[in-house]
Amino acid sequence: MNNEILDPIVISEQQFDKARAYISHLQTGLIDFLKQPKHIHIVNFPIELDDGSVQTFHSYRVVHNRVFGPGKGGIRYHPDVTQEEVVSLAKLMTWKCALANIPFGGAKGAVVCNTKELSSNELRRITRRFTSELRALIGPHTDIPAPDMYTNEQTMAWIYDTYDTLNPGKNNLPVVTGKPVNLGGSYGRSEATGQGCLYITERFLSKKLIPGLTKISGARVAIQGFGNVGSVAAHAFKEQGAIIIALSDSGGCVYSESGLDLEEVTAYKTEHGSMVGLPGTLSLTNEELIEIDCDILIPAAISNQIHADNVNNIKARLIVEAANNPTTPTADKVLQEKGIYLIPDIMANAGGVTVSYYEWVQNQANEQWDLEVINARLKKKMYNSVDSVFKRWQAFLVCEETAIDSETDTQLACPDFRTVALINAIERVANATLIRGIWP
Ligand code: NAD
């Protein structure tokens, strides 16, 4: 096994440092400010379980930066989630919002729990207690949660209801996004991350960087994760003519060279708890899925799936990071050397926060926009994101823009797309910080 460091804080700092090497005018003190979270809130709280026993749950809410507006970021329920992971995900949200030009800062939250072992009533009690503990920190203009892994519309409805009960007499709908459509949610929000992934990919392919792969139609696609993001992406790519050759969930992967029938996969998963074993398909592991011979690989589950040990076996021609942090810095370097393009998470999965922002705007005015309006706006945002990153990348490629390595005094090579996206995002946040003026 390779001794790669997988600490999420170390990884986010490595990515940040790689990008800031191209930004000559960043002051040291400002770099420190951008690297650190604004605040970390840790809460332990007891919950009475259905059998009458009491269990203490550990939870976090982190705000990384609020220069552009209220903190924004999902709440994850996962047994392995750590403070370091939540901090790194909050940072990612800052860059994601800045890159998409959305007036939010970066935040993230988590409760350490296994939703598969908890009843709906227990999850409701956990969510209400967690929300009440965060009461003074979250708010429509301070910090706005949203869904993430193993949380959903129902979780967001409970958060809204709890916050609204504790803060009566105001329009509290904008305190949380990803709500059910009949409770202030936006059309298209639950599909937005997967749908945004499609728009980002089709725009990227239209740049004709990959010979023979210039459109979604006919592309052979493998997707890790069949939750909110992965399942919507699978349907969206298939509708555009892609062949979904592999899909997975936490139980494993199903593969069919001629293409999977998504309705069959869903029905089998609903009946058996996992898609593995679906008749007419080959069963593989999640590790094997990453190395599948395909055109487009979409990691849409957990972090660190493409790493030093498997990156040399990657056969995909394009990687689209629907998940957050699925690729390690070592793997990034190898992919660039191998000429495999990667659309980074802060571009590829920004559709979710984009439509969350539209939901927040609708909530302020008590309006509900049509799905066509939402998707047209989302598409434009995603296309603009690709265009701006691509333009800057080309400037580096043809040496219109250059940067010098401060240690070796030599010219830095053309950065990969993650680094260019981060350069754009970090510059925006740094410039806004200085324009606002350092307080006091
Ligand atoms: P989800 O809980 O709906 O689905 C997660 C999926 O991952 C499930 O299919 C699960 O079986 C699978 N999975 C879990 N552990 C796995 C493992 N060890 N190996 C392989 N698969 C595994 O979550 P989601 O909302 O679809 O989020 C997926 C990813 O997308 C996460 O990284 C999340 O941070 C990111 N993301 C989500 C949103 C959003 O709007 N939901 C927005 C941006 C980014």
Image (cartoon, rainbow, N blue to C red):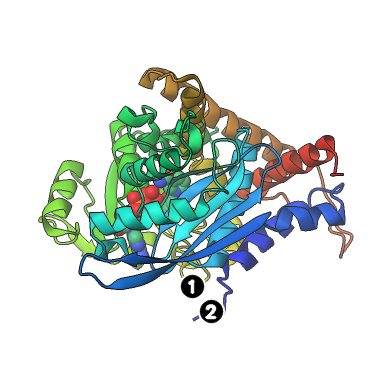
Q: Give the mark nearer the N terminus: 1 vs 2.
A: 2
Is residue 323 at least partly visible in the picture? no
Q: Look at the picture and state if 370 lies above or below 158.
A: above
Quadrant location of residue 338?
A: bottom right
Inspect the image, locate mark 2, and give the three-letter code of the amino acid beneath it.
Asn
Q: Residue at x 42, y 50 (%)?
A: 148
The x, y position of residue 390, in whole percent, is 63, 36
Circles 1 and 2, Cβ within 8 Å, touching? The answer is yes
Q: In the image, 379: left or right of 119?
A: right
Mark 1 → mark 2, Cα distance in angstroms = 6 Å
The x, y position of residue 297, in whole percent, is 41, 51
Nearer to us in this view, 112 or 284: 112
Is residue 259 at least partly visible in the picture? yes
Mark 1 Cα within 10 Å, few/some/many (few <14, many 20+)? some
Mark 2 Cα within 10 Å, few/some/many (few <14, many 20+)? few
Q: Look at the picture and state if 113 lies above or below 316.
A: below
The x, y position of residue 52, in whole percent, is 23, 70
Q: Look at the picture and state if 210 lies above or below 111.
A: above
Instruction: Provide the residue designation for mark 2.
Output: 2
Q: In the image, 398: left or right of 247?
A: right
Label 1 lies in ligand 1 vicinity (Cβ under 8 Å): no
Q: In the image, 322: left or right of 233?
A: right
Q: Residue at x 49, y 38 (%)?
A: 175
Q: Residue at x 82, y 45 (%)?
A: 402
Q: Residue at x 60, y 63 (%)?
A: 329
Inspect the image, locate mark 1, and give the three-letter code of the amino acid beneath it.
Asp
Instruction: Provide the residue designation for mark 1.
Output: 309
The x, y position of residue 403, in whole percent, is 83, 49
Label 2 element class: loop
Label 1 element class: loop
Label 2 lies in ligand 1 vicinity (Cβ under 8 Å): no
Count of all numbered marks drawn on residues in the image: 2
